[in-house]
Amino acid sequence: MKGVRSEIKQAHNGRSARFIKLFLNFTILALAVFFCSQAFSQQLSKVWERTGVASGNGVLSVAWGRNNNIIATGGDGGDYELRFWSDSGVELRRSDFPGGVSLWGLAWSNYGQKLLTGGSNKYLWIYDYSTNQWTWNVSTGGHIWAVAWSPDDSMVAAIVEKDQTYLQIYRISDKTKLVDRSLNSQGPGLSLI
């Protein structure tokens, strides 16, 4: 019986040792990611200060492309432009935002190099990074606080502030407004247009 207990204890200790080794490897990886992200954040902050992106009222929005690894920032005050950065903090380009407004919402498309933008000029805009062109826009009737793409990139959503706060969804192909629902009301369901 003593031999069986000894074998069980050794097996248990072996599993514990593997668990501890796995836990330590995961912890080291998590710390490495944390410190790398901290270092990147500090480096990007220094670059932004040096290049003036933090002037005026500063950066209001940021979006990191999943497929292109490009960071887009939108500003306020004197920074009415989009700025594009590498993941090492190098400025890649700038693009003036139509209408000279504050940029409050940015979102990269899921499959391409298109950036959905929204802000104080009450228009959703799509910027094509590959062509450096503004390719699509639609009026929302209010200030745009946040934006998002549908999973298949065929539609866009926005949180719009008019007399109330609204969720609006548009189909890209024909600019049709599919949803315009007040988020302040206690009423039932979506208001389809």
Image (cartoon, helix red, strand yellow):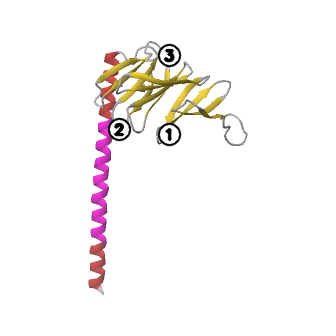
* Secondary structure of the residue carrying numbered label 2: loop
Residue 136 among those drawn in magenta: no
Q: Is residue 28 above or below residue 59?
A: below
Quarter of the image with the C terminus in it: top right
Secondary structure of residue under mark 3? loop
- Location of mark 3 (residue): 101
Q: Amino acid at mark 1?
A: Ser
Residue 84 point in image, percent of width and height: 35, 24
Q: Which residue is mark 1?
A: 150
How many residues crowd around disc 3 within 10 Å: few (fewer than 14), some, or many (20 or more)?
many
Quadrant of the rendered image containing residue 54: top left
- Please determine whether, in this image, residue 9 is positioned above or below residue 84: below
Q: Which residues are magenta?
A: 12-37
Q: Residues within 10 Å of mark 1 (few under 14, many from 20)?
A: some
107 or 55: nearer the eye?
Answer: 107
- Viewport quadrant of the N terminus: bottom left
Decide: few, some or many residues near mark 2? Use Cα within 10 Å; few <14, some 14-19, many ≥20: few
* Contact (Cβ within 8 Å) of mark 3 with mark 2: no
Q: Secondary structure at mark 1?
A: loop
Name the residue that disc number 2 marks: 67
